[in-house]
Image (cartoon, rainbow, N blue to C red):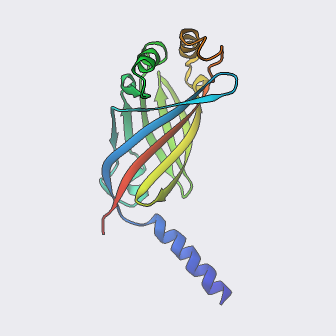
Amino acid sequence: MKTTILLFLGLLTFSTSADCYKYAGKDVISWTAFKTPAKAGVGGEFKKFTITPKKAQGTLDEMLNGATFEIDTTSVHTKNAARDKKIVKNFFSGVTIKGKVASLSRKEIEVDFMIKDTKRSVPMSYEVKNGKLLAKATIDVFDFMLHDNLKAINKACYALHEGKTWNDVNIALETTLEDCK
């Protein structure tokens, strides 16, 4: 009996990873950067980007493994137009962000990010819940050779940031998945 229950739970877990989904094209790419010695978060998102799934529908693996994206870094939106301009001018000047999903497991999406000509693999934890895929990670801008960019934004916002702009940034992707059954 115990073996039957464990086998059923194992099959149930496996079957959720093989569910069929349709890519709905309703996406949000957001981020939280940090300022001040107290590490106050500043949230924002990108309004312009392109996500190209490997397939328009199928299992998560079929759709995501090999999917690509490109972000327009001038499309920063923090609900503060003056701050947006300052971020674009001082941090994202000359910065491109592109990427490709390298692999997918039950708990992580491995994404190859190409930021300012530097490629790094970033594991993103994810979950599928209520028709949405939510993926999250933390990146270190120093891993992408953005030292000068961080210095520039810190200088431009020195008083507001109390002399401290942090190099770690939380990133998130939310996408709507429709059932294809």
- In the image, is residue 169 above or below residue 11? above
Q: Give the x, y percent position of residue 146.
A: 55, 19
Q: Give the x, y percent position of residue 89.
A: 43, 13
Q: Which residue: 34% across, 49% down?
A: 54
Q: Is residue 171 left or right of residue 96?
A: right
Q: Give the x, y percent position of residue 141.
A: 57, 25
Q: Which residue: 58% across, 33% down?
A: 139
Q: Is residue 58 left or right of residue 108?
A: left
Q: Residue furthest right?
A: 37
The N terminus - image quarter:
bottom right
Q: Is residue 55 left or right of residue 90?
A: left
The C terminus - image quarter:
bottom left
Q: For this rendering, which residue is in front, 40 or 72?
A: 40
Q: Which residue: 47% across, 29% down?
A: 114
Q: Residue furthest bottom?
A: 1
Quarter location, residue 45: top left
